[in-house]
Image (spheres, grey):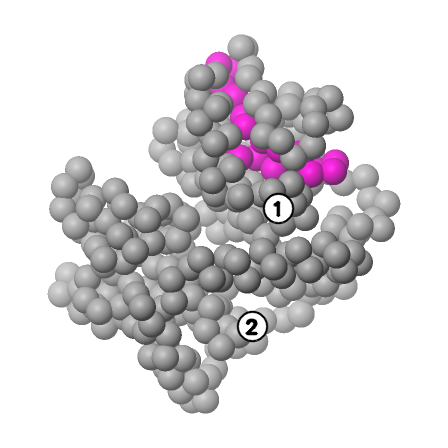
Amino acid sequence: MPLVAFTTAACREAAQRHGLAPDLDAIAQKIEREQQHLPRRLGHHFECKELGKDYRLVAYLESVDGHEVLVLAAVFRQEGRQGDYHDFYSVCDDWEAAMGQLPGDQPTRPQVSAWLAERLRTDPPEPLPAPSGTEHDFLYSTFSPQSESDDQMIYESERWVYACQAGEWTSRLYSLSQVIADALVLQGQTPPWSPKTFWSDAQRLGVVYIWEARDILLIEPIKHADDAAAAAARFIADFNPKNEPALVIDWTQLAYPAYFALDPDTWQVVQDDPAANYALSSEEMDLLRGLRKSDPERDGRREAHSRCSSTAAPAAANR
């Protein structure tokens, strides 16, 4: 189903107060037109985007009645290490604490459901086109368990994408691509699934990663070798893998053929383009998951994992 943008009353009021209502409306329209989330991640639950010169738009994703709804929740003024945005940012990894920092009353699930039903009745978003034959062939040849494709894939975790969008890493992306290329050579020399570290003395940079079959999931870039243990611990806390490599695809923020990383210029273009820093669309992900459903036991584990994740997340009505 297409991604739909819902703007809260508090968010709209703040945008109007600061003369940013047209910008907010333009972002909501672009989300639906291009089916894109906001370009930057905040912790595990939130997204953000610069709004005007001095403000940040914060949003979070809800699944309502089978639809994905991106709730545009707040407009914060950026005031350095103080103010409401700093208070929110400092707790953004804690869902309940972060929701408590959002202004106004956030909508309950029944409220969003009622709005969504009316929206779909009166002004439904344009349906997304089905994957083309070329896209379908690429997805099948790349992800099918029976695939004989030689394309090795790189997956990027949420933390990796967020780090590479941060200012402290943007100037070192060229060097980081060289570290990734060196790490790819080690396939088969390290046990799969367990977090591993590749440190380059030449570049003074490292990557924490795991293998899934022939593919690699980039967890975090690191600037100091001593940071590897903490990055691996964060991965375990985030993903709770329990030796379930089939679940990696559900946590991927970006996927591309490994040969992209072998050309530093090409890889840097992908990292520099906020519009490209997304995983496959929901339609492509649905197709991908369908292609991978050749193992009923694995699919049962995935469904159990999804139920656990849904149970762990607070219900919207209690937010």
Answer above or below: position of 47 versus 218: below
Closer to the camera in the image, 89 or 274:
89
| Numbered badge on residue 1 | 2
Q: Which residue is drawn at 38% across and 62% down?
A: 314
Q: What residue type is labelled 1?
A: Val
Q: In which quarter of the image is the C terminus?
A: bottom left
Determine the CA span between mark 1 and mark 2: 22 Å
Q: What residue type is labelled 2?
A: Met
Crowd tier of the residue under label 2, counting other residues whose Cα lies within 10 Å: few below 14, some 14–19, many 20 or above = few
Which portion, as a residue range, is magenta? 203-220
Q: Residue at x 78, y 53 (%)?
A: 144
Answer above or below: position of 137 versus 2: above
Looking at marks 1 and 2 on the same chain, the residue that comes earlier in the sequence is marked by 2
Left or right of 273? Residue 84 is left
Residue at numbered disc 1: 248
Is residue 115 among what the camera can see?
yes
The reply to whether the magenta stretch includes residue 18 is no
The reply to whether the magenta stretch includes residue 205 is yes
Closer to the camera in the image, 25 or 103:
103
Kind of element beneath mark 1: helix
Q: Residue furthest top?
A: 201
Closer to the camera in the image, 110 or 59:
110
Kind of element beneath mark 2: loop
